[in-house]
Image (cartoon, rainbow, N blue to C red):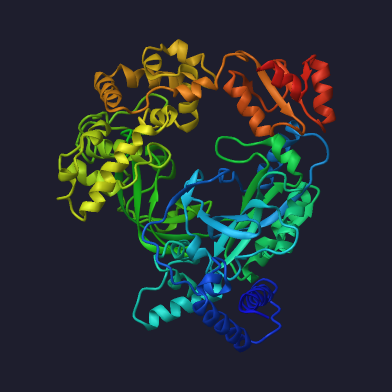
Amino acid sequence: MNTEQHINQLREELRQHNYNYYVLDAAVISDYEFDMKLKVLQELEEKHPEFYDSNSPTLRVGGEVTKNFETVVHEERMYSLDNSYSREDLTDWEKRIRKLVDGEIKYTCELKYDGASINLTYEEGALVRAVTRGDGIQGDNVTTNVKTINTVPLKLKGDFPAKFDIRGEIVLPHEGFIKMNEERVAAGEEPYANPRNTASGSLKLQDSSETAKRPLDCLLYSIKGNKLGITTQYESLGKARDWGFKVPSESKLVSSIDEVLEFITYWDVHRHDLPYETDGVVIKVNDLQQQEELGYTAKAPRWAMAYKFKAEQVSTVLQEITYQVGRTGAITPVANLEPVLLAGTTVKRASLHNADQIEKLDIRVGDTVFVEKGGEIIPKIIAVDFQKRAQSLQPTLYITECPECQTTLKRKEGEAQHYCPNYKGCPPQIIGRIQHYISRKAMDIEGLGGETVALLVKEGLIMNYADLYELKKEQVIPLERMAEKSAENLVAGIEKSKKIPFERVLFALGIRYVGETVAKKLAKHYKFIDAIITASEEELVNVDEIGIKIAQSVTEFFASEENKILIDRLKQYGVQLEVSAEKLANQTDTLQGQTFVVSGVFEKVSRNELKKLIEDNGGKISSSISSKTSFIVAGDKMGPSKLEKAKALEIPLISEDEFLDKIK
């Protein structure tokens, strides 16, 4: 056996032993024997660097240092999940999906582990990239750190596809978390707050050898890719296990919501026996074709639902009510609490939402209040313990002036929140608008964070987002914690933002009620900013999914002379304020005024590509058949009830080829 063969044999042996120990929990050699084999491999690799392998078992110990984590756009968006809290919520969800898909519906029930979401990319059976969830659109490349986690296979086994992504959670088991905290306390350091945040923070450590010291685990549950030869979610879990991934065995295939609820009831009690933190159950439609038919809302898949276990509740004392001013001027009252441990974290503050909520609960400073985490994320006050109320406590009088600029607050009829009308001069509004402009989903300006924006405003260097484009490196360098390289990166990031497409610029402007989806609709309909500026409320309302409230907000924004000046300046600086010529070249009005339902399996293009073609050619997509449907693009295995409804309403069915001919 030559040296290269010896190295490859040792690597394969160690991978199998690693899988046996960490995934199967069935070691066949001792820790000492494993360490000896690893040592031999390390020595051979040091002597023969020509046989380097980026996925060698020796790299589990870490050692690489990453100063800046590269931002990577996900090939497929990592959506969040809609939440449910009762049988009624799940029954309503089932009714909704039954209207959209045909045939028997089965569900895969999986435990919802509370960790840091990760997307792993494999090519030819080797791990090539690990990216955090980030904002769902893009995340951070943390490959060097993830390679140190023993339950992440660096090389796969079996009949794996040539390329695919697999998603899961990086978690920190209770036992490892307790041990880490014992060591920190013994060393005179503060203990970590909870396993979830510690797991998440571990992925962003600059030295991967430090990550390797932490007993992290990786639980996988979702495969993404093209032509994978998998037809159901439950089958995909089995396949992933066969390829070498650690897939929790608690998942179950069921045929009804009653069986879903049995699974939930069982695990609501037995979750405390698990080695990891879990905060609920995820229910997924099992059939992947049905998942495709159901598709996504703007925020979540229609084919999945998270059931959250009842939130932990504690009582504590309300010490003070303070008020925050948002970028739109909206005022949010905040409860400052006597610190209390809740669901693994110390809670000191909770949102009180608005004046109506304070009045409804009759919350007073000095009260003992009950606090829980809504969805176990955001703390909220749910009630007052009136038995402990002192007679001296006075009713809460909501503030009448802005806490930041002392302007008299206003409250529009029909709206819950008060707001500060001092658009031009209220510091949190000025800072907030710029922070929104630079955020990831908007202009995504690298090298510029929220704290730096606040500092730039405080120093008088900027007063609005157009001012960013006049910043010079020399102006920025004197700022606190700003070196020459940081200043260069900031200015370069601002310059790079001029290439951000129009729909994201429109979202970045911070028009009230104009979120990502609405911005896309407006950009697609009007093509350039001047057409939106001159559009009337009536014209805006005629745009697909634009209501009167959004229309009023848009016209109000562009009626402001100050905003018009900002737009003119952005134009001069070269910011994209119209749909690019390249994008326009791919768009037509061929299908204008026509509504399509896409159903079945297609050969030449994927369902998502079909939908994009419909939208690019001016058509509208609907998930359900109605009298307003113009055509149904029917593929193989179209559901019988959809077919029946189409016939009853006399909706024309066209094939994939007929549709493609239609848009030529």
How many marks do you count on the picture? 0
**On the rendered image, what quadrant is the N terminus found in?**
bottom right
Residue 522 seen in the current view:
yes
Percent x, y of residue 508: 37, 33
Seen in the picture, residue 128 relative to 397 is either above or below; the reply is below
Seen in the picture, residue 403 relative to 245 is either above or below; the reply is above
**In this view of the protein, which residue sits in the foreground, 516 or 380?**
516
Task: Please identify the quarter of the rendering in which residue 644 is found.
Answer: top right
Task: Please identify the quarter of the rendering in which residue 297 is found.
Answer: top right
**On the rendered image, what quadrant is the C terminus found in?**
top right
Percent x, y of residue 467: 22, 33
Give the residue drawn at x 80%, y 14%. Answer: 650
Percent x, y of residue 642: 80, 26
- The reply, left or right, for residue 221 in relation to residue 313 is right
**In this view of the protein, which residue sits in the foreground, 658 or 5?**
5
Seen in the picture, residue 661 relative to 454 is either above or below; the reply is above
Seen in the picture, residue 241 relative to 290 is either above or below; the reply is below
Task: Please identify the quarter of the rendering in which residue 402 is found.
Answer: top left
- The reply, left or right, for residue 375 in relation to residue 230 is left
Give the residue drawn at x 50%, y 20%. Answer: 584
- The reply, left or right, for residue 525 in relation to residue 398 is right
Give the residue drawn at x 38%, y 47%. Answer: 363
Residue 250 seen in the current view:
no
Give the residue drawn at x 41%, y 12%. Answer: 535
Percent x, y of residue 109: 71, 54
**In this view of the protein, which residue sits in the foreground, 437 or 323?**
437
- The reply, left or right, for residue 382 in relation to residue 412 is right
